[in-house]
Image (spheres, rainbow, N blue to C red):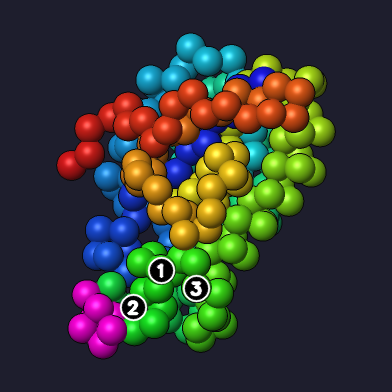
Amino acid sequence: MKLYLVRHGETCWNRESRLQGVSDIALNENGIRLAKMTGKKIAHIPFDCAYSSPLIRAKDTGNYMLEGRGLVIREDQRLIEASFGLLEGERVTKLRKEQHPILDFFEKPEKKVKVEDAESPIDVVNRARFFVEDVVLKNQKKYENMIVFSHGALIHGMLTYFYQRDVKDFWHDPVQKNCAISVVEVSNGDFSVLEEAKVLVKHI
């Protein structure tokens, strides 16, 4: 089975470099454009199963990309973005000026200290692993092409699990941009990353 991991399209908070987390922020016009155009680029792939984070930016990305296919997108809470607690909505530039410890999530992911009720990267890796074990592995022989619409941190957490990397390499390049796609071959319980963070449509 091939597993396609798609990060949601752009939102206004992405554009403004705000911590987004589990805040339910909709796609902006560019995010809708990215989703629709990326959908056209993958129109030749016969997906037979689709899952999404319940957050609207991921769900709408899936609906735009798979428009007209008649494929039901199943929501799964484990695909939600990392939570940044009370700091969601804060601009990253402001947090950098304050040298806020929440930035360890991005710069020192091996630290396990939680800040303001936020998740740690290892929390995200474990959540991704639970989804893979419960959904992906159980269906690897049932489906040929599964597509998942999720978020930057969750996808990096899943890739960390696939590669069996140490959590300090959670943000290993390449970074998954909005509507970028990673492709993983799943066979007999093994994972082989075929493409990582591939951008099919030009960002503006």
**Residue 148: percent from left, percent from top:** 58, 38
Q: Are marks 1 and 3 in contact (CB under 8 Å)?
A: yes
Q: Is residue 55 magenta?
A: no
Residue plotted at (59% across, 44% down): 164
Q: In the figure, 23 relative to 53: above or below? A: below
In-image side of 59 versus 28 (left or right): right
Q: Which mark is residue 127?
A: none
**Region rendered in magenta:** 93-99
Amino acid type at image mark 1: Lys
Q: Is residue 125 visible?
A: yes
Tell me the quarter of the image containing the N terminus: top right
- Type of residue at label 3? Lys
Name the residue: 44% across, 20% down: 42
Mark 2 or 3, closer to the camera: 3
Screen quadrant of the C terminus? top left
Q: Which amino acid lies under the numbered mark 2 shown in the image of this protein?
A: Glu
- Confirm whether residue 36 shows in the render: no
**On the image, numbered disc 1 is attached to which residue?**
108
Q: How far is the residue under mark 1 from the one under mark 3? A: 6 Å
**Residue under numbered circle 2:** 90
When the figure is inspected, residue 86 is found, relative to residue 70, above or below; the finding is below
Query: Going 43% across and 62% down the picture, which residue do you hit?
Result: 25
Residue on which disc 3 sits: 111
Say what secondary structure mark 3 lies in. loop
Judge left or right: residue 133 versus residue 185. right
1 or 2: tag closer to the N-terminus = 2
Mark 2 → mark 3, Cα distance in angstroms: 21 Å
Q: Position of residue 82 (x, y in %)?
A: 53, 64
Secondary structure at badge 2 equals loop
